[in-house]
Amino acid sequence: MEYDPGLVRIRQCAIEDAAGPSFPPIEFQAEQEAAHPVLQKRVCVVRVRLAPLPWLTINEVKKIADFIKNKVPCNPKIGIVCGSGLGVIGDRIRNGVYIKYEDIPGFLVSTVVGHRGALLIGDLNGVEVVCMLGRFHFYEGYPTWKCALPIRVMRFLGVETVIVTNAAGSVNPTYRVGDVMLLKDHLFLPSICGGLNPLIGPNDDKLGVRFPSLTTAYDKKLREIALETAEALGLRESFHEGVYVMNSGPAFETIAELNFLRSAGADAVGMSTLPEVVTARHCGLRVLAFSLITNECIMEYDSDKPHPTQEEVIETAEAKQEQISDFVFHLVSGMNKEALAC
Ligand SMILES: O=P(O)(O)O[C@H]1O[C@H](CO)[C@@H](O)[C@H]1O
């Protein structure tokens, strides 16, 4: 039988190398053909060129965590992601050690105003935390799995719970600028409509299951603690629980889009957070997430309200930063007590 390289079909090929699982090969080249000694069939030996792996393996993520641990011996149980203008949360951390993102091999760099670009590890109200002073956004050009890479790094630093914060616009007309919305659910539009789920790619079962459930993504007990903390600080009236929707950004939404999002059940809209939340749930972390409402979204045509700007977002975040950092300061203590009691 004549061997025709054009007819070779390899239906599935998973190759384990030292670094972990590979993805489908992209090129086959026939090298030789021979009779198989046992099967008594003609077989061909092929040379396989693998597609370069875009994803990091568990070992590569562990290496980043090990680098951090070698620099700063630590055992944080809570991880915090600071949203736009909310890096001030880190100012309450005592005995903190900063590591700039650019100094961490394999990490990313922040490119957005209002994101300082460093990890801060230290003591927040008696709890050891690792705090991201600045996050990564899809619109900066990072794929969603990379935006969420720090969450996996946190997991290998020993973190069990993450507090993910963001600045967001209000879609719910009863919200006011300066209010806080605890996320009770989300609409991950870039995932549902755009195939941008951060878990796309080979799954490592040692980290999490292939098909994680997100039915209880936002921990109920942690939300209760957050509301009790707000109550104790006299802030309860400005706190809500609602649905966050992610727009990939960087453009703010049109009026038609905002009305569509409202009718779909959204209360606040932003351009971040969900890659981190999905990744955290996948690797077994508990999640509390909240939005600071930094601007009112314009939902009507011919409105004379100001158009949303990054400056307004940062201004509101700065005006509220003391309140937010006070809230997080007390929140971590309540969360820690609950974790110790479990
Ligand atoms: O979600 P964070 O990082 O808080 O930032 C929010 O603020 C920026 C828009 O002003 C966008 O990046 C949006 O996502």
Image (cartoon, grey):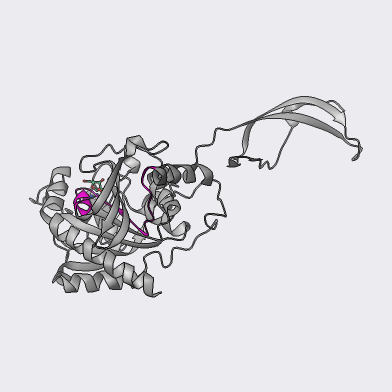
Quadrant, the C terminus: bottom left
Vertically, is 112 above or below 173?
above
Q: What span is colored magenta in the figure?
A: 71-91
Quadrant, the N terminus: top right
Say whether residue 172 is visible: no
Q: Where is residue 171 in the image (x, y as percent from the top left)?
A: 22, 59
Q: Residue 43 falls in which quadrant of the image?
A: top right
Which of the two residues, 126 or 342, is positioned nearer the viewer here? 126
Q: Where is residue 165 in the image (x, y as percent from the top left)?
A: 27, 55
Determine the residue positioned at 84% across, 25% down: 2
Q: Position of residue 309 (x, y in %)?
A: 16, 44
Determine the residue positioned at 53% across, 58% down: 211
Say whether residue 153 is visible: yes
Determine the residue positioned at 39% across, 39% down: 107
Q: Where is residue 35 in the image (x, y as percent from the top left)?
A: 89, 31
Vertically, is 65 above or below 175?
above
Which of the two residues, 238 or 110, is positioned nearer the viewer here? 110
Q: Which residue lies furthest to the left in this view?
A: 304
Q: In this view, does 3 lie to the left or right of 266?
A: right
